[in-house]
Amino acid sequence: MLLQIKDLTVSYKLPIGKVKILDNVSMNIDKGEIVGIVGESGSGKSTLGHSIIRLTPPNTVFDGGEIIFDGKDILKMKEVELRQIRGTGIFMVFQNPLNSLNPVKIIKQQLLEALKVRAERDGKEIDDKEAEEIIINTVKDVRLPDPKEIIKKYPHQLSGGQIQRVVIAMALLLRPKLLIADEPTSALDVTIQAQVVKLFKQLREEEGTAIIFISHDISLVYAIADRLVVLYAGRLMEDGKIDDVIKNPLHPYTQGLISSIPNITKKEGELKAIEGNPPSFLILPKGCKFSPRCPKVMQVCKEKDPEIIEKDGRKVRCWLYD
Ligand SMILES: Nc1ncnc2c1ncn2[C@@H]1O[C@H](COP(=O)(O)OP(=O)(O)OP(=O)(O)O)[C@@H](O)[C@H]1O
């Protein structure tokens, strides 16, 4: 087991008080496994990703739980230990990738540093000519135009989509044990998206990198992940093998997410979005947090929050299966 998240509870401090976002989230990731995390906007996906690498906003409060990476609890680590892990241990491609780059260094220098960190980990010497060749090839892999010119530029001279690809190139050069990718292809067109998915899969094959792929786009996650985790209002609603979940979603929320995606269901006439909006974390409904929007709601759902149960090797939080 590479990563074990146990009962993770995370809040944000606000002037009006503390707001709990992640509520007792538990999930495991094996070496080389690709796990997709999906859910509507605001379901807590980024909060979960940032918590794992402990790069969270300053008003974050870790209220409980453990994040065990390679046998050690990230929540108990000191900043020096965290710095050792970030990079070749865990690397994150943020939704806003500009934050991952240093504004005063040209791209080449930043990619070179990433490559050197990895070479050092592997105990390899790498000369400048060889390094430049590897960097150019990686920049080509992520389909950046004019690689030799682009690596001489500063981050502010690139577009959002180009920056996103530079950060993905950085991940490919670092070859971390765990890559957390938060909407990594949101600024890219579909052909480049497909290329990134291919490169991530290749990274997993060659290096055994585990990947957490965060997205609101289930069809994209379907193209890459082995497992799917569904979050709603900061709670884990379903967790299972991707084929099982897509072909036979158990939770009505997962069913709603899947039936609203045309490429997966291919039943265009039947497409409909889930009615209503996710609840505010300030006034969460009593009982199951999805109950006000659930087409299969029962009386018990409005009164008591269901626990997670295991069914056919899958986890689901729903009274239908109690
Ligand atoms: N620093 C913060 N302080 C207070 N609330 C925050 C902070 N960061 C995020 N939130 C709130 O926490 C909730 C979860 O946000 P998060 O970004 O984790 O969700 P998400 O599923 O990644 O959404 P998206 O797909 O839009 O990125 C949202 O209601 C968001 O407004």
Image (cartoon, rainbow, N blue to C red):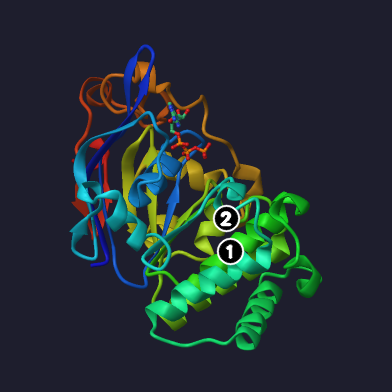
Q: Is residue 233 above or below residue 181?
A: above
Determine crowd level at label 2: few under 14, some 14-19, many 20+ residues with C-alpha closer than 10 A. Answer: many
Give the amino acid at mark 1. Answer: Ile
Tell me which numbered mark, 1 or 2, is placed earlier along the sequence. Answer: 1
- Residue 232: x, y in percent? 39, 36
232 w.r.t. 171: above or below:
above
Q: Position of residue 235 (x, y in %)?
A: 32, 37
Q: Which of the 4 quarters of the picture holds residue 120?
A: bottom left
Element under disc 2: loop
Residue under numbered circle 1 = 168
Query: Which residue is the site of mark 2?
Result: 184
Residue 201 appearing in the image: no
Tell me: is circle 2 under 8 Å from ligand 1.
Answer: no
104 or 107, nearer to the observer: 104
CB of mark 1 within 8 Å of CB of mark 2? yes
- Is disc 1 placed on a helix, strand or loop? helix
Say what amino acid the circle numbered 2 marks: Pro
Q: x%, y% of residue 222?
A: 51, 61
Front in this rendered view, residue 319 or 91:
91
180 in relation to 271, above or below: below
Residue depicted at x 68% and y 51%? 187
Left or right: where 71 falls relative to 221: left
| Among the 4 quarters of the image, the one containing residue 312 | bottom left
Which corner quadrant holds the C terminus?
top left
Gap in angstroms between the C-alphas marked 1 and 2 = 8 Å
- The residue lying furthest to the top in this view is 16
Rendered residue at 47%/33% (across/down): 42
